Amino acid sequence: MQLYNLKDASEEVSFSQAVKQGLGRKQGLFFPKSLPKLSDIDGLLAMPFQKRSVNIMSALIGDELGHDTVEMLVNNAFQFTAPLAHVTENIYSLELFHGPTLAFKDFGARFLAQCLSHLTPADEAITILTATSGDTGAAVAQAFHGLANINVVVLYPKGMVSPLQEKQFSTLGDNIYSVEIDAAFDDCQAMVKDAFDDQEIREDLHLNSANSINIARLLAQVCYYFEAVAQLPVDKRKEAVFSVPSGNFGNLAAAMIAKTMGLPIKRFVAATNSNDTVPRYLLSGLWEPKKTVSTMSNAMDISSPNNWPRIEAMFEAGYLDKSILTAETVDEDYTHMGVRQLNSLGYQSEPHAAVAYKALKRSLTDDEVGIFLGTAHPAKFKETVENILGVPVALPKELAEIANKDVLSARMPADFAQLKAYMFEKLA
Ligand SMILES: *Cc1c(COP(=O)(O)O)cnc(C)c1O
């Protein structure tokens, strides 16, 4: 697979280079020069999840890594299921929260961890630096915990991550370092960008990003869209509409890659909370990020979504027509309502999925089949869900075990010089 830099098309790299480098020159994102069109989609859909995923990933990166390596990476990474739950009439939830940190980011983070550990020479040590508004940090920390020659630094905004989310990445220790920043998520993301601009950090610490800009994470996420369609009754497959709860828009970009590769998907709904840069952009054509506001669906509290250029690139390349994407903004009242309505349908959910559900309800017609993405387990947002529903939410054992562990984070303001000093002290 060859990829190019979306900000400087003359920079071309292999998949391995793109994975190790994360970002290209001028902080440009990498994107495949071409996407394979899969043949025999019905045959693929008939396969079990892992085997099908090996085929999909092999079509993307098998030329470079070889089929057997791809098979090993996929099998090590995807050790949990993605069931499609029937919620009501023509609406389903794709449950992406059955991995170790109970959120969809486990798919991408675990595949990336496998790729990096395969690609890093035994005598080198690399540093993963990532900013999180909650779930990324947990997924990345868990995916890399204990891997040789890889250190992880997680930055997160003070007071904007649920206590249990924080515990998932800040209690591990060993090769996992967490830093609480006294600022918003976008400031954390800016510090990550500064670090990538800093030659000393980049070279001495072999810096790598593991957030949703890394192409390995994005490509891994393509697989579960096939899994969703595979679980639909055969006669409903042609009319599937996906509603994707979106923050950085990596998940939606992966969905659009899946369609480009031949998966039958009718159209997409991009669902955001009040951080609505994309819905406003699709209406007005103007890209005008506002100040980020805090919401219940805090993993989507992002006003400058960093994967959007990849979606634009797919439109520009003519892979997909712009009409297949609409967007809906779901504010706090409607999110609240969404959690309650789902509960009254017998489906306990959480704010991110509820945003996608409400967006889907607004958009779906009677002859369509809607799938909203359940991106996190309700227990990850226990306090919020309990406040809305007034009933206790049970903690699954993965979360119950860490609830009593100590937070090991360092703390600092949004000051890049302090971060740099910390990283050299701990990792050099
Ligand atoms: C990260 C996250 C999202 C947003 O996904 P993007 O790929 O950043 O758009 C939605 N829901 C949950 C629970 C998340 O953790």
Image (tube, rainbow, N blue to C red):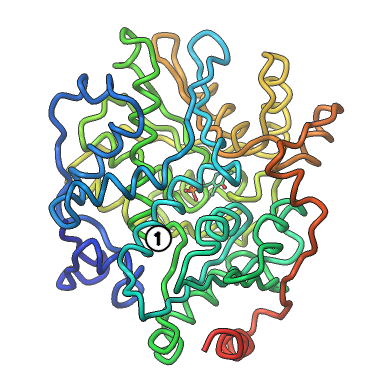
Please report the residue visible at 50 percent of the width from the left and 19 percent of the height from the top.
92
The front one of 220 and 278 is: 220
SS class of the residue under badge 1?
loop
Left-right relation of 387 to 326 = right
Q: Residues within 10 Å of mark 1 (few under 14, many from 20)?
A: many
Q: Is residue 307 above or below residue 84?
A: below
Left-right relation of 274 to 260 = right
The percent position of residue 405, horizontal first and vertical second, equals 79, 58
The percent position of residue 366, horizontal first and vertical second, equals 45, 9
The percent position of residue 153, horizontal first and vertical second, equals 57, 72
Left-right relation of 200 to 238 = right
Please report the residue visible at 54 percent of the width from the left and 41 percent of the height from the top.
99
Q: Is residue 124 above or below residue 393?
A: below
Image quadrant assignment for residue 349: top right
Residue at label 1?
213
Task: Look at the numbered disc 1 and say if its residue's Cβ is closer than 8 Å to ligand 1.
Answer: no
Q: Is residue 179 above or below residue 378?
A: below
Image quadrant assignment for residue 344: top right
Please report the residue visible at 42 percent of the width from the left and 16 percent of the height from the top.
369
> As shown in the figure, which amino acid type bears the numbered disc 1?
Ile
Left-right relation of 14 to 290 = left
Quarter holding the N terminus is bottom left
